[in-house]
Image: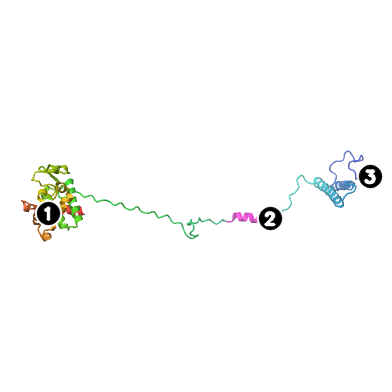
Amino acid sequence: MRNDGNLDDPFGSGRPADRSDDTPSINRLTTLRGLVRRTRFWAPTNPRPGRTKLAVATGAACCLGLVGVSQAGFGAPDRAAAPAPSAEVAERAAVDPASRAMERPSITPTTPTTPGAGPSATASPKATAKPKPKKTVRQIVPVAGLDRTQMNNAKKIVQAGKEMGVPRRALVIAVATAMQESTLLNYASGVLPESQNYPHQAIGWDHDSVGLFQQRPSSGWGTVEQLMDPEYATKAFLSALEEIPGWQDLPLSVAAQAVQISAFPDAYAQHEWRAGEVVAEILG
């Protein structure tokens, strides 16, 4: 028979040595309560009221915590059961799967906007300036059986006439006359060695006649240097042609002969059609 005086002392000498850990939970709780009653709380000799209350409360809390640990440790399963989820947690768990299962709306990319033009203005590609077409110089080709040198001389005659402002008919007469007199080559004269000092393409021996129109310095047409210049020679011819009354209505051979006073007055007419073709090519 166990001593009742030692009932509240689990560590007393009257505790049976063969006591197992299978003591019911009620007995263990009674034992722990005895420990709490026997625990002495230390307090200073002259404590302040607030500090005394704090010390007592702290000691009580520690003892209660010890009781709670003892209750959880004795007679409980190895792992404590998880607390039941609250209603709010259950509601969130139900909403989350539903929201993840919902179909997400597709995102349509927006059209980029021009900076500063507002949200509705769409960016437009920069307009590239088209390069201006380069002006091409029309290449004048030799026609009517002429070579490049002859065609270039005919071009000089037409250009000089255009500077004077003469009509097309005067240009045809001038070209036809040069075809007859020099075959559209700038002649120097073997009689006038001075003429060979200037650019020329052939040398003739018809007295002192020089240049495209075989004009004679001795007849007052100009100096040798002047007459060897195709531009000057052409303007000298056209100026004399314009002094002939009604030259526009005269046959080509008559108008040319009135200026040149040639020994073969009818020879100019044969070049009229070729001269017209050359002038048309140059004028375009």
Viewed as shown, does residue 102 lie left or right of 223?
Answer: right
Label 3 neighbour load within 10 Å: few <14, some 14-19, many 20+: few
Kind of residue sitting beneath label 3: Gly
Q: Is residue 170 in view from this perspective? A: yes
How far apart are the two marked residues, 3 and 1, measured between alpha carbons? 164 Å
Q: Amino acid at mark 2?
A: Ala
Residue highlighted by disc 3 = 5
Relative to 104, say whether 150 is above or below: above
Q: Quadrant of the N terminus?
A: top right
Disc 2/disc 3 C-alpha distance (Å): 53 Å
Instruction: Give coordinates of residue 8: x percent, y percent.
Output: 90, 45
Pointer 2 residue? 90
* Residue numbers of the magenta segment: 93-102
**Residue 100, horizontal then vertical, whole percent:** 60, 54
Q: Earlier in the sequence, mark 3 or mark 1?
A: 3
- The C terminus: image quadrant: bottom left
Callout 3: SS? helix
Please say if the residues under marks 1 and 2 sit with CB atoms less than 8 Å apart. no
Residue sitting nearer the eye, 89 or 249: 249
Disc 1 designates what residue? 272
Mark 3, mark 1: which one is toward the viewer? 1
What amino acid is found at the position of numbered circle 1 in the picture? Answer: Glu
